[in-house]
Amino acid sequence: MSDHPTNGLSDVVHQRHRLGILTITAESKRIEFGYLKETLDLTGGNLSRHITVLVDAGLLNLEKGYDGRRPKTWVSITRAGREALAEEIAALRALVDRHGD
């Protein structure tokens, strides 16, 4: 097996919207679905699909509830999600180091 940095990239995490979801959720205790939708400029359906992939991989948790009478969905990163994000960033850093000036 090669030790090339691209071997450290995760097919689940590396997709740009999923990487965006993970980096945003890593910055707070939990993030509201609408905030992610607006920040990443995604449709609700598209965001929902990416979140489902990350939840199924054990990288995110979902919490549904209400803010007054309005239904809300909050997203939070799991410990495994933080580890996967750290590994992805390390692989990207290794690529930059390999090709940097």
Image (spheres, rainbow, N blue to C red):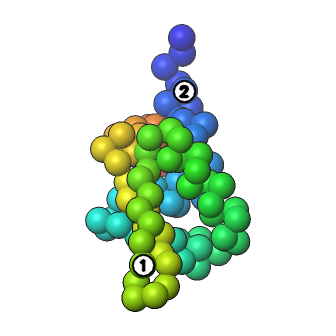
- Quadrant (top left/top right/bottom left/bottom right) for the N terminus: top right
Residue at numbered disc 2 = 7
For image coordinates 65% across by 75% down, the residue present is 41
Point out residue 21 in the picture as x, y percentages from the top left corner.
50, 60
Helix, strand or loop at label 1? It is strand
Q: State the mark number for residue 4.
A: none
Residue at numbered disc 1 = 66
For image coordinates 50% across by 78% down, the residue present is 71
Q: CA distance from mark 1 to mark 2?
A: 42 Å
| Label whose residue precedes the other's in the sequence (1 or 2) | 2
Q: Which is nearer the eye, 38 or 72? A: 72
Q: Residue furthest top?
A: 1
Q: Identify which amino acid the numbered label 1 is placed on.
A: Tyr
Instruction: Specify whether 73 is left or right of 28.
Output: right
For image coordinates 35% across by 66% down, the residue present is 30
Q: Which is nearer the eye, 91 or 100? A: 91
